[in-house]
Image (spheres, rainbow, N blue to C red):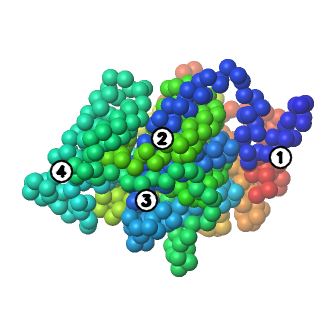
Amino acid sequence: MSDDTMALSEGRWRRVPMVRWLPRYQAAWLRGDLIAGAVVAALAIPQALGYASIAGAPVEVGLYALPVALVAYAVFGSSRQLVVGPVSTVSVLSGSLLASFGVAGTAQAASYTAALALGSGLVLVAAGFVRVGWMAEFLSKPIVTGFVLGLTLLVILNEVPHLVGVSTPTGKVIERVSALGSSVTRGEADLTTVAVSAVSLVVLFGGHRLLPKFPWGLLVLLGSLAASAALDLQARGVEVVGPVPRGLPRPGIPAVDPADLAGLLTAGAALALVGLAEGLSAARLFAARGAYRIDADQELLASGAANVASGLFGGLGVAGSLSKTAAVSDARGRTQLTGLAAAGLAVVVIVAIAPALSVLPRAVLSAIVVNAVWKLMDFEAMARYRVVRRNDIVAAVIAAAGVLAFGPLNGLLLAVAGSVIGLVFRSTRVDVEVMGKVPDEKAAWGSTRNHAERSTYPGVIVLRLDVPLFWVTAAPANDSILALIDSTPATRALVLDLEATNQMDTTSADALADLRAALVRRDVDLFLVRVMWPVRKALRRSGLIPDLGEDHLWHSISQGVREARRVHGLLDLPAHDGVPPAGGALADEPLDADGEEHIVARDPGPAPPNEQGS
């Protein structure tokens, strides 16, 4: 195939990344990918069972999700290594949402769980096609860390009753903790269940310390199945998983009450948001390590396809998994063939081995779940946020506390709302700095704050806005600028640096016009410098540039200052307030028409590539 033909084919199939990487696959990668696939299956299969129980659904729901999600992501995903499947965060939220519909633990649980996955997938696919991947950036690392910490604590709390063999309490977190403590102190715990849990936890946690890369979860799963069958643990009072059907389910639309469709779609959107936060974080981390890039919008589409496939085949919601992706990296998996290999092994388990899982002790599943989520509590990151920036640790704590106090969805929304409010608050803190010329530099200007050596020119004041000018900051910026002008009554010209502003709206354009009018009343001339192309375009459309004049827009501060001094006859006045540079008084750089092109407001030139068609 010629390069031109391949390029045309890739352009046509750009939404299907597999078309790009599969023809370039190298045979040398096969062994590593197959080994990594086996490692993923060994980790993912027992975890899928546990995550289904977290979601309040039958354990086979977790198994059904695994192979179809892996295949869908392998086809559509932009990450070479990301593993998609049931994960703790999505499973916990799915179980919480399932309870809100009143079907958790009932015969309808499997259908509603699949419907949540399907709704989540449809939302993600739609978001991918309209290219809103940027929205995921509102889920900052501190928010995700705090959210996952809160979810992990909830997961562990939910699994403790199964670990000690007592009934699961209901109510708020504090009420559940109190009820659990009362049950244990009254001696209601089942000693056989406690023994099974203790052995499982010791093997999982202790084994990981001895041989971190060994699939201890699979060993515990197989060992507990053998022990349960040999010792008839169910007859001894140990809760078991129960019947698990053999074979793959037939694809179909989940059967739910039509009155719940709108609520399921809304809940699916929440599931999508949580899953996307975890999946994108993992994909970006390993893309950076592997020196390749991912496409956030393609990740929306790929994660959506995986959830749609899972929902249609009766599975639960899925997302990218950090722990299993790390296992792929450690096993030297190079491509998404790893996911396809793991999917094949999962199908073998579902078709041939699933019924044998019926005697699996529920306590073992809980131990596997606790072991899987324990490492997600990143207290080191929380400590680092406290050191780096107070707002980060506040956002993380709000997310964690919100999850515990109000549930996963409301906790996440609370944290995101707090983050957005903080962002808006910081963006409205307008700082206007007086600029001076840096000694011994040809055209360097910087703030005079704490820099008395930087020189200014009589009659000309240079101001810089350190925040973008938009509808929120426009009025405060005008007030600050006019206050500085009024404090220097000898000012004849204002040179305003707009480099921090890369977009311009009607409100801020009108505010600049109001500023110019206020300056005219004070007999002060306005010059704009370092004005971005989109801003010039908006100012031209608003009518400000024709009023201001083309000769009042310049590329650099030095050019603007030079022109302001020339227009107002200030060229002969020496600089002041600074320490003269070595060798004599501060000199102006020459205004070279060939070397320093003036901004022509009448024709701003072609738009930058990312502005075409705007």
Q: Nearer the viewer, mark 3 or mark 4?
A: 4
Q: What residue type is labelled 2?
A: Ala
Q: Which of marks 4 and 2 is nearer the N terminus?
A: 2
Q: Dot 4: within a 10 Å radius of its alpha carbon, few (fewer than 14), some, or many (20 or more) residues?
A: some
Find residue 126 and report its horizontal and vertical position in percent: 66, 61
Find residue 467 and report its horizontal and vertical position in percent: 53, 52
Q: Mark 2 points at which residue?
A: 44
Q: Nearer the viewer, residue 342 or 19?
A: 342
Classify mark 2: helix, strand or loop.
helix
Give the left or right position of residue 394, taking residue 117 as reference.
left
Residue at x 52% of width, y 51% of height: 246
Q: Disc 1 versus disc 2: distance between alpha carbons?
A: 34 Å
Camera sees residue 570? no
Q: Dot 1: within a 10 Å radius of its alpha carbon, few (fewer than 14), some, or many (20 or more) residues?
A: few
Q: Nearer the viewer, residue 327 or 412?
A: 327
Q: Nearer the viewer, mark 1 or mark 2?
A: 2
Decide: is 459 above or below 100: above
Give the left or right position of residue 561, taking residue 255 as reference.
right
Find residue 322 and report its horizontal and vertical position in percent: 48, 39
Q: Dot 2: within a 10 Å radius of its alpha carbon, few (fewer than 14), some, or many (20 or more) residues?
A: many
